[in-house]
Image (cartoon, helix red, strand yellow):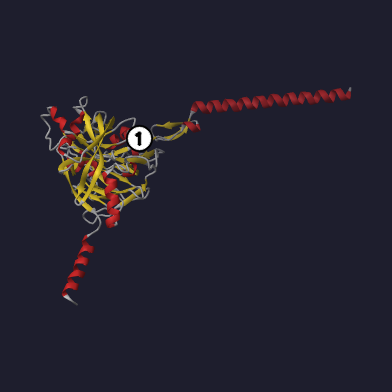
């Protein structure tokens, strides 16, 4: 074989082995615990760290004028200055956008703009639409979410933002050029964003959930089955599944109230009445001996774990919140550090790879009570349910926990039976009198 031909074949082989059509981007974790991806905007380019947001499909940047506010606690990396880019243009159309996370709620005035944008090498989009923040004067405290960042990078459902979403345009270009997949993955543990495919580390496999029921939602939703702790399914006998949402602008794990009240707290010494769940055990808390919260993506799927120690904030507080008005889970960044997130936009499915494989340490779990007699053990609340004797007009014997005859009820029954016999006896007497009367009339 000729040397040139050999090297040509070798180069093609190496290219085929190395190119998987997936772009890997480094994520930076801010001191607030959120993640940014570096985005280049303007001509000439400037680098701006933008917070990943799965609740927005478009990108938002903060303009230079924000420097008028004196944020002494902020470390401002770089604010977008439209006057420094000669490819910038604006439509002068503004409106208010409301955003709510587990820690922040704010309304900001944004303005539709265009400029040259790129976040992947050699993939530049000219006149890409995005939004500028024009006013936060009434939300300066809540706006601390943007500390160590220059705005938001929209990772929400890009198909709802055709032409506006940088992610949508990027994936379309990658599919045409490289045959990449229509999806992305986030590795919170290793701080990587994978565009055009999925690359979980450590040989972990991805397990896919049910198809997302609503295609018109901006956020990513999945069905969650068998939410458990200490070996007890907290959803048992209440519901077959609940919905979960991914929110990279939230920090904590949000759990529906009915699963926490008298269920999670019956298994673990937690008080969840305040802003966060707090440890209220008698002994000092040993974080290394906490159980895991476990769930599945299908009725008979694999288990995924969220170790409670990964949600520990210090001072006996856990990054677990609950609201009575919410009936779905929200997975913030602290919960997602235990998982690899895969989003398949074509099939509308969410998948996870589990990065935590240690067995759950249940040494802090409450002791299972000993049920006796006709009591039935109910795992979600970790209690024994007394037999339902009243429907049989019986009462519970407190010593044997079995149904015993209700004396009052039996007296009523006996009285009713006696009354029945009296009525029957009276009817028979009257019947005899009637027959005898008829016979006497015939004789006469």
Quadrant of res 154:
top left
Left or right of residue 418, residue 269 in this image: left
Q: Which residue is situated farthest in the front direction here?
A: 86
Above/below status of 367 relative to 351 = above
Q: Residues within 10 Å of mark 1 (few under 14, many from 20)?
A: some
* Number of numbered tags placed on the structure image: 1
Which percent across, then down, holds residue 285? 17, 37
Which residue is painted at 86% across and 22% down in the image? Answer: 441
Quadrant of res 290:
top left
Q: Which quadrant of the figure contains the N terminus?
A: bottom left
Which percent across, then down, holds residue 208? 33, 50
Which percent across, then down, holds residue 95? 29, 30
Considering depth in this image, is 291 or 373 the residue closer to the camera?
291
Which residue is tagged 1? 327
Considering depth in this image, is 4 or 242 the residue closer to the camera?
4
| Disc 1 secondary structure class | loop
Quadrant of res 379:
top left
Which percent across, then down, holds residue 427? 71, 25
* Residue 251 in view of the camera: no
Q: Which quadrant of the figure contains the C terminus?
A: top right
Left or right of residue 410, residue 188 in this image: left
Considering depth in this image, is 294 or 361 the residue closer to the camera?
294
Q: Which residue is situated farthest in the left direction here?
A: 72
Left or right of residue 78, residue 130 in this image: right
* Residue 146 in view of the camera: yes
Above/below status of 344 relative to 57 = below
Which residue is painted at 19% across and 27% down in the image? Answer: 141
Above/below status of 50 relative to 12 = above
Q: Which residue is situated farthest in the bottom direction here?
A: 1
Considering depth in this image, is 327 or 290 the residue closer to the camera?
327
């Amino acid at each position: 074989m000729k040397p040139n031909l050999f090297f040509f074949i070798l180069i093609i082989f190496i290219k085929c082995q190395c190119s998987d059509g997936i772009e890997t981007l480094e994520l930076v974790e801010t001191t607030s615990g959120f993640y940014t991806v570096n985005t280049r905007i303007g001509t000439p380019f400037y680098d701006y760290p933008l917070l990943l947001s799965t609740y927005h499909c478009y990108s938002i940047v903060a303009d230079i004028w924000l420097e008028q506010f004196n944020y002494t606690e902020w470390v401002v990396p770089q604010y977008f200055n439209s006057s420094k880019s000669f490819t910038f243009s604006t439509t002068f159309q503004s409106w208010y956008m409301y955003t709510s996370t587990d820690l922040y709620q704010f309304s900001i005035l944004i303005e539709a703009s265009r400029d040259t944008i790129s976040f992947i090498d050699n993939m530049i989009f000219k006149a890409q639409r995005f939004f500028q923040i024009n006013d936060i004067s009434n939300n300066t405290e809540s706006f601390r979410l943007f500390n160590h960042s220059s705005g938001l990078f929209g990772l929400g459902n890009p198909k709802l933002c055709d032409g506006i979403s940088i992610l949508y345009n990027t994936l379309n270009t990658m599919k045409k050029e490289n045959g990449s997949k229509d999806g992305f993955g986030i590795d919170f543990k290793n701080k990587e964003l994978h565009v055009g495919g999925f690359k979980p580390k450590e040989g972990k496999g991805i397990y896919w959930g049910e198809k997302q029921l609503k295609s018109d939602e901006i956020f990513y939703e999945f069905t969650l089955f068998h939410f458990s702790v200490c070996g007890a399914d907290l959803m048992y006998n209440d519901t077959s599944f609940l919905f979960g949402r991914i929110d990279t602008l939230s920090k904590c794990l949000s759990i529906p109230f009915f699963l926490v009240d008298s269920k999670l707290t019956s298994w673990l010494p937690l008080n969840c009445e305040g802003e966060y769940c707090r440890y209220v055990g008698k002994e000092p808390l040993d974080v290394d001996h906490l159980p895991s919260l476990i769930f599945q993506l299908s009725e008979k799927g694999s288990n995924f774990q969220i170790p409670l120690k990964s949600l520990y904030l210090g001072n006996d507080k856990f990054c677990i919140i609950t609201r009575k008005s919410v009936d779905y889970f929200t997975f913030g960044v602290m919960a997602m550090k235990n998982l690899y997130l895969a989003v398949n936009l074509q099939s509308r499915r969410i998948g996870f790879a589990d990065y935590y494989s240690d067995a759950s340490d249940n040494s802090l779990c409450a002791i299972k009570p000993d049920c006796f007699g006709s009591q039935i053990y109910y795992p979600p609340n970790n209690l024994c349910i007394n037999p339902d004797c009243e429907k049989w007009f019986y009462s519970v014997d407190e010593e044997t926990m079995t149904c015993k005859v209700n004396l009052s009820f039996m007296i009523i029954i006996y009285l009713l039976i006696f009354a029945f016999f009296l009525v029957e006896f009276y009817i028979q007497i009257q019947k005899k009198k009637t027959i005898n009367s008829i016979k006497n009339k015939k004789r006469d």
